[in-house]
Amino acid sequence: MIVLGIESTAHTFGVGIINESLRILSDVRRQYFPPKGMGIEPFQTAEYHSKYSVDVVKKAIEEAGISIKEIDAIAYSKGPGLGPCLRIGATIARALSLKYNIPLYPVHHAIGHIELVRSYFNLSNPLIVLVSGGHTVITAYRGGRWRPYGETLDITIGNLLDVFAREVGLDFPGGPIIEKLASRGKRYVELPYNIKGCNFQFSGLLTKAIQLMKKGQVSIEDLSFSLQETAFSIIVEATERALTSLKDSINSLAITGGVASNNVLYEKLVKMANIHGLKVYRLDKRWNSDNGVQIAIVGLRMLQQGLEGVPPEEAYILQKWRFDEVDIQWM
Ligand code: ATP
């Protein structure tokens, strides 16, 4: 079985091709970077995807060393994400499906992040911390779906880092730049720490950090350090609370999504997990951020489960779509 996955929810247009042994035959991507001081603008990003998408598909097939006729399924990101960007991926998927008569599988992007780390490490019952620009949630699989056991009630962690970066004049994406600056920070400045139960909020923290930066009383290094310390401690505390209540049925912890590449967050999580005798699994950096392989892997699971694809005329997109609305039939 060979599955081609198309990712186009936001900044990245990616195509990944895998086989049934989860061997990655190819992974080609192009990432859009907005002009300095700007965020990801949906139409400009879609225009970029539209310009490079055909080339990315061709390169992925070429790199995989297969003929397109050998592909058994095409999976595409149905959502959640930016409408114009999602439409590019869905349109390419539909066109390929129609031309070559290949079944089409719509995939929830966040389930892709989760399934990639779960499958790669063969995790049977993990608690997953998904931290990215679109999601910040602590989730475990129960009763046929990934259920949220804690999550942000306002902005995501990726949003906190990227918006802070933009407001203080740093490039996009802000996360890796803030990580570097934070490593040179020495003084902790107190910032709002909002957590209730296993849920939390970051917008007060963002506002305060921007205010402090604009007043010019704190260096960018100290502020980056304090921002990371506060936000990551909140996530780790929420994870520990969720973990404590689920402990008897959880046998590992995994972290995924773009922000999972941050070593400070990872080390904090490892320290906490050690106390509870759990290991933390994390993929290589490349696989934490958006890619076509994470979409292909969900398509493969659906195909292996014997699920039917959708006809091309029903290959819709969904800009808003919660991951806990998706029935998972392969676990
Ligand atoms: P989603 O996958 O939920 O749709 P997304 O489209 O933003 O979200 P990702 O590629 O998973 O996609 O994550 C991007 C985010 O990861 C950005 O907010 C970026 O700043 C952040 N990020 C990347 N590397 C790091 C790092 N080293 N430290 C902190 N954040 C990082």
Image: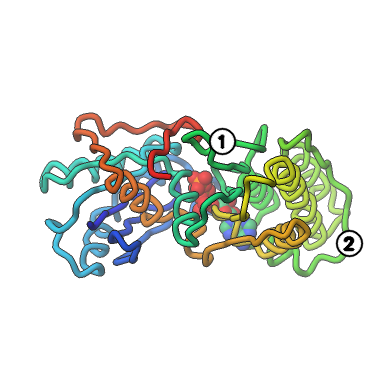
Q: Position of residue 264 (x, y in %)?
A: 71, 62
Q: Position of residue 56 (x, y in %)?
A: 28, 59
Q: Is residue 85 visible?
A: no
Disc 2 or 1, which lies upstream in sequence? 1
Q: Is residue 29 visible?
A: yes
Residue at 75% across / 63% down in the picture?
182
- Which of 72/28 is in front? 72
> In the visual, does 32 lie left or right of 268?
left
> In the visual, does 191 lie left or right of 256?
right
Q: Where 257 falls versus 44 (above or below)?
A: below
- Which of 324/142 is in front? 142
Type of the residue with mark 1: Arg
Q: Is mark 2 within 8 Å of ligand 1?
A: no
Q: Which residue is mark 1?
A: 147
- Which of 326/34 is in front? 326
Residue at 43% across / 32% down in the picture?
319
Residue at 24% across / 38% down in the picture?
309
Q: Which residue is mark 2?
A: 187
Type of the residue with mark 2: Arg
> How is this picture coloured?
rainbow
Disc assigned to residue 278: none
- Which of 234/177 is in front? 234
Q: For the C terminus, which image quadrant?
A: top left
Q: Are marks 2 and 1 in contact (CB under 8 Å)?
A: no
Q: Position of residue 114 (x, y in %)?
A: 49, 49
Q: Secondary structure at mark 2?
A: loop
Kindly report the distance in space between the C-alpha atoms of the residues bearing marks 2 and 1: 38 Å
| Circle 2 Cα neighbour tier, 10 Å, few/some/many (<14 / 14–19 / ≥20) | few
Q: Secondary structure at mark 1?
A: strand
Q: For the N terminus, which image quadrant?
A: bottom left
| Circle 1 Cα neighbour tier, 10 Å, few/some/many (<14 / 14–19 / ≥20) | some
**Mark 2, mark 1: which one is toward the viewer?**
1
